[in-house]
Amino acid sequence: MLPGPAERPLVIGHRGAPGYRPEHTEAAYRLAFALGVDAVEPDLVATRDGVLVLRHENEISGTTDVASRAEFASRRTTREIDGRELTGWFTEDFTWAELSTLRATERLGGIRQHGATFDGRYPVIRFRDLLELLDAATDEHGRVIRLVAEFKHTTHFAALGLPIDELFAAELAAAAWGRGDDRLISEAFEPTLLDRLRDAGIRGTRVLLVEDRGAPWDLVTADGSAARTYDSFVTEAGLLGLAGTVDGVSVGKARLVGGPASSTDVAGAARRARPGAPLRGSELVDAAHAAGLAVYTWTLRPENRFLAHPYRRGTARGAWGDWLGEFTRIMRTGVDGVFLDHPDLGIEARRTLAEP
């Protein structure tokens, strides 16, 4: 048996290594493997003919060259996705054969101008392509590299007759991953999707993604204004209620960076005085662990634009600030896994924590 990740927190390449190459490309994933990630995280969306492809969203004008392709000009449309009206080009309006002709572009080109120099070099890839890359990387690097599959807009796709959970199970079987294994972590913003994965016998770890505000769209669709909010899942009672239904939660880093430094700080005491208040910082992690849940956080990035204010240096949005200070502060909460655009920085931060 090859060795799997042993150190904590897990360092997870968020869409590969998009701090260095355009996200969700073969180049970004290969670089993530070489940089030493414990896992990589793809976002899964579907084509019209039921192929799972790797894109940040189903609207692809910001991550491909589709807007410049005259043959697809008529596909531009306006659509409501999870309650938001968006205009652009959507994966569900393309076959895989059509999408395979597109080339990836840097989504954060205004901040990562070096990433934009790779625009047009790499094609869009499928989920099955990544599974092949993972198997090859395991052999090449002599260690198990995990997969953190994120399911996007599952209620939307199901309404179109494209059930992403069923497509996912079929892809795993076709790639000889069976119905999943210990390498697999599945995460979604919609809890009913995680329930369906469990009922379908998909093995591995199941993680509920928790936005900073709002409510899961599947619950909004079912319950309207009475839908459970994301905040309600990260109270003490909410975390205890998740135990046995999922294996962990994954929160935006603002819920951890803004948390108390210790159990005795004034803000922490004020929160504990409000029953049912959402937890933050180490309090959230400790309560989740007490409920038997793992905690992951996203997305750690070194640029000023994405750092909490105390860690910014200078005024340039794309300049790197005190990323090490923020990353290690987050890791000291006891979090089990971190998603990063620059995986090597996560490994360096983890190494710093281990130093005497």
Image: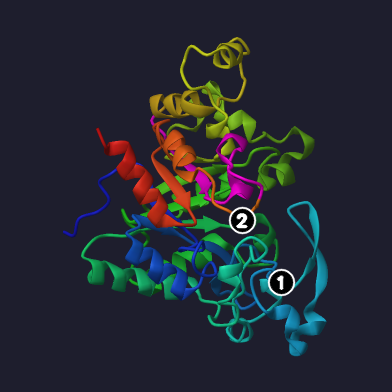
Would you name the residue on which mark 1 appears?
Answer: 61
Q: Residue furthest front?
A: 314
Q: Is residue 110 visible to the viewer in this orientation of the structure?
A: yes
Q: Is residue 282 left or right of residue 74?
A: left
Query: Observer-nearest residue: 346 or 65?
Result: 346
- Position of residue 48 measured from the top left corner of the image (x, y, whole percent): 65, 76
The residue shown at (50%, 75%) is: 126
- Position of residue 193 measured from the top left corner of the image (x, y, whole percent): 56, 51
User: The disc labelled 2 sits on which kind of residue?
Assistant: Gly
Image quadrant of residue 128? bottom left
Which callout, 1 or 2, points at the residue further toward the start of the chain?
1
Disc 2, SS: loop
Observer-side mark, 1 or 2, equals 2
- If the image is split into quadrants, where does the N terminus sit? bottom left
Q: Is residue 337 above or below residue 67?
A: above
Instruction: Give the magenta-colored segment's residue range.
Output: 292-315
Residue 87, disc: none
Other-residue count near label 1 (Cα within 10 Å), few / some / many at <14 / 14–19 / ≥20:
some
Would you name the residue on which mark 2 appears?
Answer: 318
The answer for how far apart the CA atoms under marks 1 and 2 are is: 22 Å
Query: Observer-nearest residue: 222 or 141?
Result: 141
- Position of residue 192 measured from the top left corner of the image (x, y, whole percent): 58, 46
Image quadrant of residue 247? top left
- If the image is split into quadrants, where does the C terminus sit? top left
Other-residue count near label 2 (Cα within 10 Å), few / some / many at <14 / 14–19 / ≥20:
some
- Position of residue 237 measured from the top left corner of the image (x, y, whole percent): 54, 22
Q: Which residue lies furthest to the left in this view?
A: 1
Q: Which colour scheme is used?
A: rainbow
The residue shown at (75%, 79%) is: 67
Q: In this view, does 26 lie to the left or right of 221?
A: left
